[in-house]
Amino acid sequence: MGEQMEERKRERIKVYAPDGAVGSPAAAPAPSVPVLAGKRIGILDNAKPNAGALLERLAQRLASRTGAVLGLVETKNAAVAAPDEVIARLQSEVDLVLAGSAD
Amino acid sequence: MTGDAPLLLDLAEDDPDALMQLYDEHGWGDGLPMVPPTPERVETMLAAADPDETIAVLPPRSGIATRRVIAINAVLAGCEPAQLPVVVAAVRALASPELNLRGVNATTHCVAPLLIVHGDIAESAGYNSGLGAFGPGNRANASTGRAVRLILMHVGGARPGPGDASTQGGPAKYSYCVAENTAQSPWGGYAASVGVESASAVTLHCGEAPHNVHDMESSDPVPILDKVASSMATLGQNNAPISSGEYFVALCPEHAAVCASAGWTRRHVSSYLFNRATLPVAELRRAFGLRAWAPWQQALADDDRVSMTEHPENIKVFVVGGAGRHSSVIPSWGMTKSVTVAVGV
């Protein structure tokens, strides 16, 4: 009996992978802006430490190198998605948005 | 929406060590031995349920959690079929927008979803609501919590590093599941108190590991709840700078009985703690930028005191545990709300 159990244990078997399929992303990234000259740069500050300073400096350097201009600055909480009205304001006021800063 | 059938892999032998070696090559597993999820074991776990039904899509990986995928992870974790309905309901709850699973999975904080099992299934499926309920020693509690963690890692992609940035991780991220001690709750079941009138239910609260509250001598609610309030009012937890955060106060039966015998309801306990769990505004201003405070809290003067959360309803009270006089406080991660859902069969 014990030998049979050992034998069965040693047989090659099939097991499932545990991760399942990946769903489609809810939204695809927007295409890049091909030329920045004259475009308006927005900032979405996620309120992580120094995110505002980092993104603003980045926007200034980008603007000085490309001829873009600094536009709207919005702030959101890092842990949740930006409210619809913030996204709508950025959409109407600027052509590209700098966003995202970690701890 | 249905997910593709999970892949079947060759395993050298029906043995936990062999499985760990195979899974390790794919970056799967939680570091502990697992039960090999053979098709036979997974079919037994599923019983007659539709295996291809999508229960939820879990971020950040956007993994599709079908019943079969959930059952695979339940087998891995050591669940019995009786516990699968709780795991399925918990996965459904994880996808609730207010729970904010993307943030919960990805944050640097040590947050883990606590499962609180309510009602008939707590008894019928063998959950422990009494002595030592937070563990160890009970298969249903341990394996259900572990199954949810494995689903978060495998399906949701919450692996330390790419999908889980928790600075130190935490023991609650292995398994975090208790049953409510409804039999010794003087206020009835928690689920009904939040409007879920189902024979069985599960609550998910994304929080820290329990912070102990010890009171051996009091026969009056005030000294007991003052100690609870003291555990709530500390600067190091996320609730300090985030005013919308919830607290779960897990009262032991003896502490709950003291409160109830003095005529205090569940709501009275929450209201008292709301007023007692406070810190000086100046102290909080020294410690934080206060950016996640409600506007009315930001308007307070430095010499005012402010509650650790903006509303008494954010302080949730339930009963768990056995003999003895230790309760606990489970602060929230902050940007998440607890969810209670019915458990189907």
Image (cartoon, helix red, strand yellow):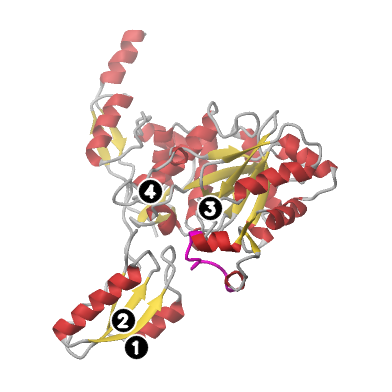
Mark 2 belongs to which subunit? A
Mark 3 belongs to which subunit? B
**Which amino acid, mark 4?**
Ser
Residue at image position (31%, 72%) is: A53
Mark 2 surroundings within 10 Å by alpha-carbon count, few (fewer than 14), some (14 through 19), many (20 or more): many
Say if mark 1 contacts mark 2, CB within 8 Å: yes
Which mark's residue is nearer the viewer, 3 or 2? 3
B6 horizontally vs B49: left or right? left
State how far apart marks 4 and 1 are (Cα): 36 Å
B137 or A97, nearer to the observer: A97
State how far apart marks 3 and 2 are (Cα): 34 Å
Q: Position of residue A13 (x, y in %)?
A: 27, 28
B85 or B254, nearer to the observer: B254
Q: Which residue is mark 2?
A: A42
**Which amino acid, mark 1?**
Glu
Which mark's residue is nearer the viewer, 3 or 1? 3
Q: Earlier in the sequence, mark 1 or mark 2?
A: 2
- Helix, strand, or loop for circle 2? strand
Q: Position of residue B335 (x, y in %)?
A: 50, 60
Residue at image position (54%, 26%) is: B137
**Which amino acid, mark 3?**
Leu
State how far apart marks 3 and 1 are (Cα): 39 Å
Residue B235 is labelled as 3
Position of the N terminus of chain B, as image quadrant, is bottom left
Q: Earlier in the sequence, mark 4 or mark 3?
A: 4
Work out whether disc 3 and disc 2 sit on a shared chain.
no
Start-end of magenta stretch: B287-295
Q: Which residue is mark 4?
A: B166
B327 horizontally vs B45: left or right? right
State how far apart marks 2 and 4 are (Cα): 30 Å
